[in-house]
Amino acid sequence: MKKSLIFFIAVIFFQPLLFTQTPWTYREQVSGVTTNLTGASSIPQYYYQNYAMVCGSAGVVLKTTNAGINWINVSSGGIPANVDLYTICVFNTDTAVTAGNTGAVTYVYRTVNGGLNWSQVFTQSNGKINAIALKNSQLAYMTGNPVGGRWSLWKSTNKGLTWDSTGMYIPQAGSETGFANSLSARHNFVVFGTNNSRIYRSTNNGTNWSFMISPEINSNSLWIYSDTSGFPAGYAYIISGSNNLFRSTNLGVNWAQSSCPDSSSFFVGFAPGIPGVYDNTPYFIFAVRNNNKVYFTYGTNNFTSYYSAPAGNYNHLSTDYTQFLSPNYLYAVRTNGGITRIDNFLGGGLKQLSSLLPDKFELSQNYPNPFNPVTNIRFAVKKYGLVRLMIYDVSGREVYGAVDDLLKPGTYEVNWDASSLSSGIYFYSIRTEGFTATRKMILVK
């Protein structure tokens, strides 16, 4: 079987905005390994956004608790070095599961203490677990290549402790198999891809299954979005077929092809940008292929290459859901142990003006003020630590996440474009260890 290449694409739903600058950055991480890294998972809760895990060949698992500033190798607590891991799923800062193979035997390992120890919770001969997808804090789904003419399809309702396939019977069609991390679960929907022209799906949390015809053979990566708010546009499939990319907003009845550079390489990952208020309109979409580039679209049909990694080819891109306009981090892993962190938030560009140690923490008045529509916010950081700079409207609703990162001492400036917002009074607030401050600014259009 061809090496499974993941197309992990992130779709965010909101109304399109106009930007004068890129509202995210790409930061290379120091992973401490040169191992082929194959899967990444971050916690889909806003308050745990600094936590993530990645997995790879030779039983390697790395975790970060500070948004990638440091990566800790947690591979030695029970995962044999001869097991090549393909997928990982994080439930919370304590619990995670990862799956891989040694020869023709597949295994699933689980930790309940943040990776210090791992225990085997599942094994299957002559199979390969391809993907594990989190549905909520307890529920997860797992798919693997067919065994004995039946797709290996499992569900866990206790954070991956036990796995059950009762009622989840899908016969194999021909010699079809699956792809690593080609699985998505959202609301009542679960879908996974194949190297056939079929995409298998359930619309009732795995109770019943059917298939829809993919617009092209090889749905080697997919992402599904559906909501329960009653908006007819709130349902979308986004898949890759070989080196092409397709999207459907009507449950797979019709498909529209999207253009993307470098079509000679397979897609390997989708990941979300920033979710919208109503979760019903495609917004930000990130994508990676099995090359060294990250691609992006504002939710239109066409992708653009926005970043090139210094070495190695991408294998996967973590997906996550966050609160509206809140900071979020995506992690893309590569064949050489490389990890790229995408700082995905709708703020302005952050730049460091000086690395000299300030006398104190300080939040300056924005300039110009009043402004239309761009302004600058300067602040000083006295001590290394987590800094959050958020912008609120007069009702106290957070409208932009400008900074949410571990910063070194120095003086910084954020350039913020408020062209999508209406005139009025806004407040910006900084929070870090031992210091908080808030100032007012006025947008006049």
Image: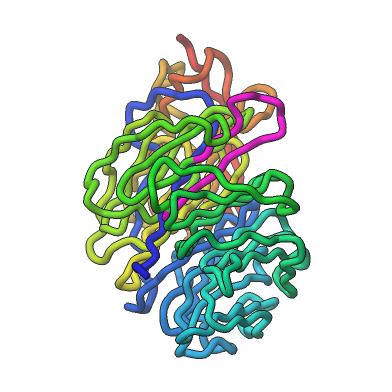
User: What is the quadrant of the C terminus in the image?
Assistant: top left
Q: How many marks?
A: 0
Q: Is residue 375 left or right of residue 109?
A: left
- Percent x, y for residue 198? 49, 50
Query: What residue sits 42% from the left and 69% below the top?
Result: 38
User: What is the quadrant of the N terminus in the image?
Assistant: bottom left
Query: What residue sits 66% from the left and 35% below the top?
Result: 227
Residue 233 within the magenta-colored segment of the rendering: yes
The residue lying furthest to the front in this view is 174
- Is residue 113 at all visible to an observer of this figure? yes
- Percent x, y for residue 246? 40, 38
Residue 343 within the magenta-colored segment of the rendering: no
Whether 363 is drawn above or below 368: the answer is below
User: Which of these two is toward me, 203 or 355?
Assistant: 203
The residue lying furthest to the top in this view is 445
- Percent x, y for residue 365? 47, 30
User: Which of these two is toward me, 207 or 224?
Assistant: 207
Whether 11 is drawn above or below 254: the answer is below
- Percent x, y for residue 415? 38, 33
Residue range corresponding to the magenta coloring: 220-237
Whether 310 is drawn above or below 18: the answer is below
Residue 226 sits in which quadrant?
top right
Query: What residue sits 50% from the left and 77% below the top?
Result: 61
Q: Is residue 254 left or right of residue 311?
A: right
